[in-house]
Image (spheres, rainbow, N blue to C red):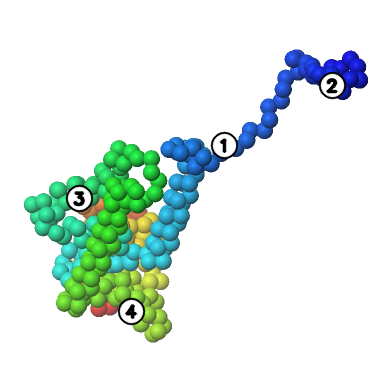
Amino acid sequence: MAHKHDPNEKVVFVGDSRIRKRDRAATPPPDYTAFPGKSEAFIPNFLLKEWMVGVVVLVGFLVLVMSEPAPLGYPADPLNGSFIPMPDWYFLFLYQMLKYPYTSGSYVGFGVVAMSGLPFIALLLAPFLDTGKERRFYRRPITSSLMVLSLVAITYLTWISWNHYQEELKLTGTVPEHIEREIKAREAVEKGLPRPVPGKEKIPEMVAADDPAFKTMQQAQCIACHGSELEGGGGPALRGVGDRLNKEQIVETITNGRNNGAMPSFKGQLTTEQIDQIATWLEKQKAGS
């Protein structure tokens, strides 16, 4: 406020205290490097960085899994002595570690629980073992050493496990199941035949597939267990059942069931004529027919 035109007169500005001063736009906090010895804000700065790193690692892992999927082998056969069990490639290092004397045999409990749990224990203890404020990895000996040791161990054990597997295949002359399956499928396609179903190559052809009894079985939902083409599924295959059971035994099985309800009873659901019709047709299902 001024009273005269004197240029040297002190000018005083009077404000109205009833008018609230508007808050200026919140300025972003300075970079954490401006505060020596201090870290950045956990939310959202640090959390966002960790999340982005996790996403990149997860996407890379998923790409590897999709590019090298686990092979689908044949159904388990306990009588197959030439089968060499192998886990997925990302578990090879654990599989190899369990082969060593101090993690197998009498020490299998130690190998399964302690050795596989060490990385998780180290991860949990890392924040308590490394409490320094230094962010450069070469000035953080504990965490850097654990990381390098883990990467070297995983790489070495994976390489050793895969080489050992290849040597076993050569010594035994074994062709891996997924490769054998691809060869058989390729040969069938070249001959104009349908692709073989693993584990069901020895099932005989269906006899008189246009018989009305087959349609009756479809209506009775027999195919839910025995397969849409009687090739087997949740229950045994009925192709070739005539080599194992005669008509009377088949009628008894359909009427009263079998194996404590595993094969349900159809008494009351199917007429005597329908059961006889189905049994007559199933008796014809023989491998030599």
The residue that disc 3 covers is 115
Give the residue type that dot 1 points to. Answer: Pro
Q: Amino acid at mark 2?
A: Asn
Question: Residue at left 44%, top 37%?
Answer: 38
Query: How far apart are the alpha carbons under marks 2 and 1?
Result: 42 Å
Look at the numbered disc 3 and give the secondary structure of its residue: helix
Where does the C terminus fall, quadrant-wise? bottom left
Image quadrant in which you'd find residue 181: bottom left
| Residue under the point 84% across and 19% down | 9
Structural distance between the alpha carbons of marks 3 and 4: 39 Å
Residue sitting at x 14%, y 48%: 109
Q: Which residue is mark 1?
A: 29
Q: In the image, what residue type sits under mark 4?
A: Ile
For marks 4 and 1, the one nearer the N-term is 1
Seen at 29% across and 67% down, the residue is 73
> Alpha-carbon distance for marks 1 and 3?
45 Å
Q: Residue 276 at what x, y percent from top left? A: 30, 62
Q: Which picture quadrant has residue 286?
A: bottom left
* Number of the front mark, 2 or 4: 2
Tag nearer the camera, 1 or 3: 1
Q: Which of the two labelled residues, at mark 2 and mark 1, occupies the earlier sequence position?
A: 2
Q: Quote the CA–CA distance across marks 4 and 1.
A: 64 Å
Q: Nearer the viewer, residue 272 or 42?
A: 42
Q: Are marks 2 and 4 in contact (CB under 8 Å)?
A: no
- Mark 2 or 3, nearer chain start: 2
Q: Which residue is mark 4?
A: 183
Could you say which disc has been placed on residue 8 in the image? 2
Q: Residues within 10 Å of mark 4 (few under 14, many from 20)?
A: few
Q: 156 above or below 50?
A: below
- Residue extending farthest to the left is 106
